Image: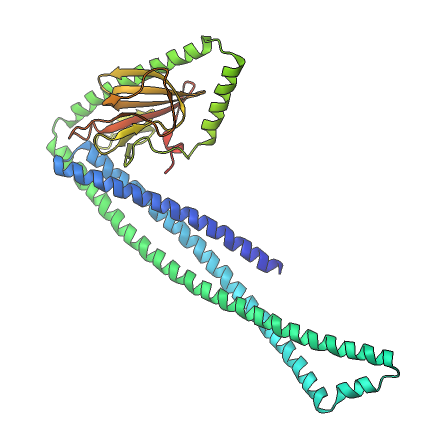
Amino acid sequence: MVAGLFFLTATFANAQTIKSIQEQIRSAQEEIRANNRLLDKNRKEQKMTVTQLKLIENKIENRRRIISSLESQITILTGDIGAKSSNIDRLNRELEDLRREYADMVRVAYKNYKINNFALFVFSAQDFSNATRRIALIERYNLSREMKAAQIDSLSRRLTLQVAELKNQKRELDQIRTTRGGELVSLSDDQQNYRNSAAQLKASEAKLSSTVRARQQQIEQAQRQIRRIMTEEARKAKTLKRSAEEQRQITAMTGRFDQNMGRMSFPVTGGVVIERYGRHSHPTENKIVVNNPGINILAPRGSDVRCVFDGVVGRVFFHPTVGNGVLINHGQYNTIYSNLASVTVKQGDKVASNQRIGNISNSDNPDENRLHFEIWRGMTTMDPSLWLRR
């Protein structure tokens, strides 16, 4: 009984884990589809660009996520199938024992019936009270036999169900292994496409290195401006006198922001992250190290940009490199949205989660159709990917 309960608990836990893994796979597949839509559109409109190369790189990363998730499923299913096979063996042994016991009881009952032992057993009683007890004993014996038959029937049904589930899991395992094989082939194709595209980009742009360096310097200037803005905001927050109620509201909003880690919706629909948070090499210039304080999201041109959480607009700013920008305060947190073509909010506005605050460029140039998104807590940047819902 304990072994059966443990098996059911483990099976339920594995089912929950597989459901979570399947959700990760669906998320990665959806990102690849969005990636392909943007990649196809960019290819139609112009020659190979660094943006297209980053899209291919993102496809490779999502493909690896899918393969890793599939392999996790294979591991769980393989273990589950092994446990289920052992459980079926145990149930078969129990069923055989029950059947033997029942057969013995039937043989005893038939033998006693043939020689009238039960009747003799009752009528040989010394008195009526003793006869009554002997009748009750015979009834208990018959009831025990009926219960044994019911046990056999119940166990047989359980065994049939377990065998059917085992067959289904084996079929599912075969399908997952086939899917993983297809994903490995696609990954190899994507990696080859990346190598070819990188070579094509290098060959077509002789001045690529100097162009990239100049662009990187512009981005670093914009980052310095954003850091200055954050420094000013921090200084202002420190000197500003707040009432106890205002301080309570800030603490409550900070707590709600914390609680929504990993649950916030993407700031642009159909967007794909083409440059992630932190330090990493440039896709075509290995000597150039990019230190991104946020993430860059490529989206269909003209896409609306939406606030990821309730807050108050702390500032609207502009920089020649990153266009218009909006800083939104969420208690001790701040989110920054830059490279906007237009802004629909102003300083002091209260904004709600998923409210439109502007839009990105409607240009044919994919380098302009991207959102730069940052999350700060005080003067520390956070990885936005950890906060957004995949």
Identify the residue shown where x is 42% and y is 34%. 262
**In the rendered view, would you say 321 is above or below 299?**
above
Position in image of residue 70 (x %, y %): 37, 50
**In the rendered view, would you say 380 is above or below 201?**
above
Location of residue 330 (image quadrant): top left
Position in image of residue 30 (x %, y %): 30, 43
Location of residue 153 (image quadrant): bottom right
Q: Nearer the viewer, residue 344 or 32?
A: 344
Identify the residue shown where x is 50% and y is 69%. 160
Instruction: Assign the N terminus to one quadrant of the image.
Output: bottom right
Q: Nearer the viewer, residue 32 or 342?
A: 342
Instruction: Assign the C terminus to one quadrant of the image.
Output: top left
**In the displayed structure image, the side of residue 348 where residue 196 appears, left or right:** left
Position in image of residue 242 (x %, y %): 49, 11
Looking at this view, name the residue that lies furthest to the bottom.
115
Position in image of residue 325 (x %, y %): 29, 20
Describe the colour scheme in one phrase: rainbow
**In the rendered view, would you say 386 is above or below 89?**
above
Identify the residue shown where x is 51% and y is 12%. 243
Identify the residue shown where x is 49% and y is 66%. 161
State whether residue 223 appears in this view: yes
State whether residue 65 appears in this view: no
**In the displayed structure image, the side of residue 170 where residue 6 appears, left or right:** right
